[in-house]
Amino acid sequence: MLVAGRGRRLALSFLRNHSGRPGSYLLQREEVAEETRRVRARGKRVVGVFHSHPVSHATLGPADRRAAALNSLQLVYDVCGREALLWRVYWRAGRKRVAATPLTLVGRRS
């Protein structure tokens, strides 16, 4: 999950992938709700989700777009190209749309 804290910084909160299919991910509602409660208890808020694309670009595919919540952020990491892109999901002209949003990576490397 993408967590917003102070300023415009985002942090990652990892949840288990419950999908049994390669190349897909599935979050459990109960785990999302529990992590959301933990995040709020720390004075922060959940603003979206993140996932990786092992063999494709850091864009939102059709299934990603359908599953994305309106007014959320979606962070996608291209494992091969080592590129992360942040997408904003919004409603305009009667349909769900996405737009790339500037992202600056800070912090330590592992």
Image (tube, rainbow, N blue to C red):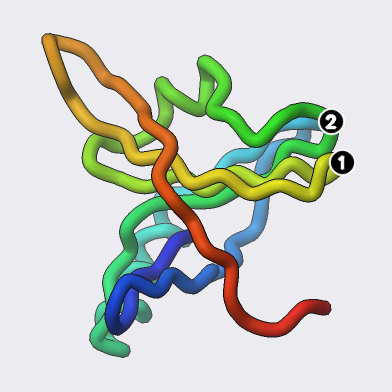
Q: How many marks?
A: 2
In the image, residue 28 above or below residue 13:
above
Indicate which disc residue 31 carries: none
Horizontal side, residue 10 vs residue 61: left or right: left
- Between discs 2 and 1, the one toward the N terminus: 2
**How far apart in space, not on screen, are marks 2 and 1 (Cα)?**
6 Å
Question: Where does the image place residue 15, in percent across and percent down from the top left?
Answer: 59, 62
At 32% from the left and 71% from the top, the residue drawn is: 8
Which is closer to the viewer, label 2 or label 1? 1
In terms of secondary structure, where does tag 1 sit? loop
- Mark 1 surroundings: few (<14), some (14-19) or many (≥20) residues within 10 A: few
Residue farthest along the bottom direction in this orientation:
42
At 71% from the left and 84% from the top, the residue drawn is: 108
Q: Which residue is mark 1?
A: 80
Question: Where does the image place residue 7, in percent across and percent down from the top left?
Answer: 28, 79
In terms of secondary structure, where does tag 2 sit? loop
Q: Amino acid at mark 2?
A: Val
Horizontal side, residue 74 vs residue 110: left or right: left
Which quarter shows the C terminus? Answer: bottom right
In the image, residue 89 above or below residue 83:
above
At 29% from the left and 83% from the top, the residue drawn is: 6
Whether the residues at callouts 2 and 1 have beta carbons within 8 Å, the answer is yes
Q: Which residue is mark 2?
A: 55
Question: Where does the image place residue 53, in percent across and percent down from the top left?
Answer: 73, 37
Question: Where does the image place residue 83, in percent across and percent down from the top left?
Answer: 71, 47
Q: Quadrant of residue 99?
A: top left
- Mark 2 surroundings: few (<14), some (14-19) or many (≥20) residues within 10 A: few
Q: Amino acid at mark 1?
A: Cys
In the image, residue 27 above or below residue 23:
below
Q: Nearer the viewer, residue 23 or 59?
A: 59
In the image, residue 10 above or below residue 72:
below
Horizontal side, residue 76 vs residue 95: left or right: right
